[in-house]
Amino acid sequence: MAAIVTAEGLHKSFGRQGSTSPPVLDGLDLELEEGAVLALLGPNGAGKTTTVRILSTLLRPDAGRATVAGFDVVRDARRVREIISLTGQQVAVDDKLSGAENLTMMGHLAHLPRRVVRDRVAELLTVFDLADAASRRVITWSGGMRRRLDLAAGLLTRPRVMFLDEPTTGLDPRSQQALWDVVRGVVSDGTSVFLTTQYLEEADRLAQRVALVDGGRIVADGTPAQLKRDVGEAGVELTFASASDAGLVAPALAATIDGARVRVPTDGSVAHVRSVLSAVEATGVTPDHWEVRAPSLDDVFLALTGHVGQERSARSAGVAA
Amino acid sequence: MTYVLRDVSTMTVRGLRLVSRDVDAMITAVLLPVIILLMFVLIFGGAMDTGTEYINYVTPGVILLAAGFGAANTALAVEHDMSSGMVERLRSMPVTAWTVLSGHVVASLVKNLVTTTVVFGVSILMGFRPEASPLEWLAAVGMILLFVGWITWLAALVGVLVRSPDAAGGFSFFVMFLPYASSAFVPVDTLPGWLRGFAGHQPVTPVIETVRGLVSGDVPTVADPAGVAVLAVVWCLGLGLAFAVAAGLAFRARR
């Protein structure tokens, strides 16, 4: 399959000339195949938003080259803008306008014929379950509804590539689920999706390919299945009253130990979890608390890069100090 | 290029909706000049000697002060667009940079037309007696709109450059004081010498003199009304054009 978005050696720094601030992008390469979903996964400050801003023509890279559908994002920016849509981290809709007014405005700005705008607005309001609220001002809407309107605004033109910058950050689980369904629908209509996220689960649910970004470069890249195989599916996590209790239990299991916490990799099946718990019970030490936990972004970074994502490690160091 | 007119009209419709639904700003835009008018006429008016009924002297000044203040509010609207993510979206679309700003500018012109009409109405209730032919009214309105135009483009530029709503709000405050150092409230030759130089040559003075000459019949006109009017128009068009270009460039450059 052909790549519809490519980036080669993107560099970007925001510091003034001669300053020592580290680059935001430091030789980032990636590729999105036509009709697929690529998730750019990483912590805050990894360079996700900067990458999206460059690919969507809002920002020029200091070095390197990026194309969308063969058009250079710097030299052919106008052509690129005709075939993409961008939904940024902030919801970009006018609070004082109604939902229908917002969408109609975006349709006109996208230069669609007036009749098409009317039909498409009605269609999207229905698809996104916003038809009932369509004539109310957006300021009265819930966060999830505003996010859906924001996405709808990006879909009026049936873009070839849709950029979504952390689309579910701050959404409740139900709105998150609704948004994932929308993205799947968009993809089945033939749009390629470039998504950034902090959530491994989101990347897993939506993307055919996941690129892990840290410190402005891609540190790992593969299918969600490959990444999960490297990280381990999930773990039974047991928290004990003390580290010595944990030390008594750990030898009975194929476990890693972290203070008073013990983690046993699991496939999540009832049989395996039961066998782990039976083994714990047999030692005679009772945990204060236990749970089956999916790997977090921190786990992924730890497993694939040997360290925690840059900003996170800085933050936890700050907390410890 | 063929889409420029459509983009401008789309953004103007948006700007008008935003402005007309911002009830607080509308109330301020009407109440503030009315209060200032009351203050000048009732409190300072008795002590003023402009050789005429003071309300006839001061009304055009208050109108321009109100128009300037209303126009300056565009800085807030533009700043909101810049910081709320709206501009990010618009810039990822094939929309020409300055059409986004021009929507705000046209909306500001319409809004200020409405508010100045109200202020004119109130001043007539308070005893302002305009003497102007329909053609003179038209010319006065045109002059006020040119004035609103350049302040609005300056406000748009400020809105693009500043990084907080507070800074944008500070700008309207500053603009409100510009007419004080002009012939808006007192004749220029009553000012101290050093201020007279600024007041006599800043753009607000010829605009005020022109509007006053057109609508306030009993106020003695300046020596060369036509020359002052031309000066006023040149000032407004020149500044308007300069700030429009600067705002467009700043909008494109801001990353």
Image (spheres, coloured by chain):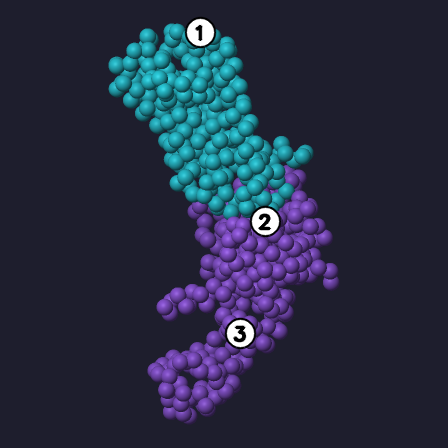
Chain colours: A purple, B cyan
Q: Are marks 2 and 3 on the same chain?
A: yes
- The x and y percentages for residue B118 are 40, 22
**In which quadrant of the rendered view does residue A185 lie?**
bottom right
Mark 1, other Cα within 10 Å: few <14 / some 14–19 / many ≥20: few
Q: Are marks 1 and 2 on the same chain?
A: no
Q: Identify the amino acid type marked 2.
A: Leu
Circle 1: element type: loop
Q: Identify the amino acid type marked 3.
A: Gly
Q: Which residue is mark 1?
A: B223
The answer to whether one can see residue A40 in this image is no
Left or right of A181, for residue B29: left
Q: Which residue is mark 3?
A: A306
The alpha-carbon separation of the residues under discs 1 and 2 comes to 55 Å
Chain under numbered label 1: B
Quadrant of image for the N terminus of chain A: bottom right
Q: Which residue is mark 2?
A: A59
Q: Nearer the viewer, residue A115 or B15?
A: B15
Circle 2: element type: loop
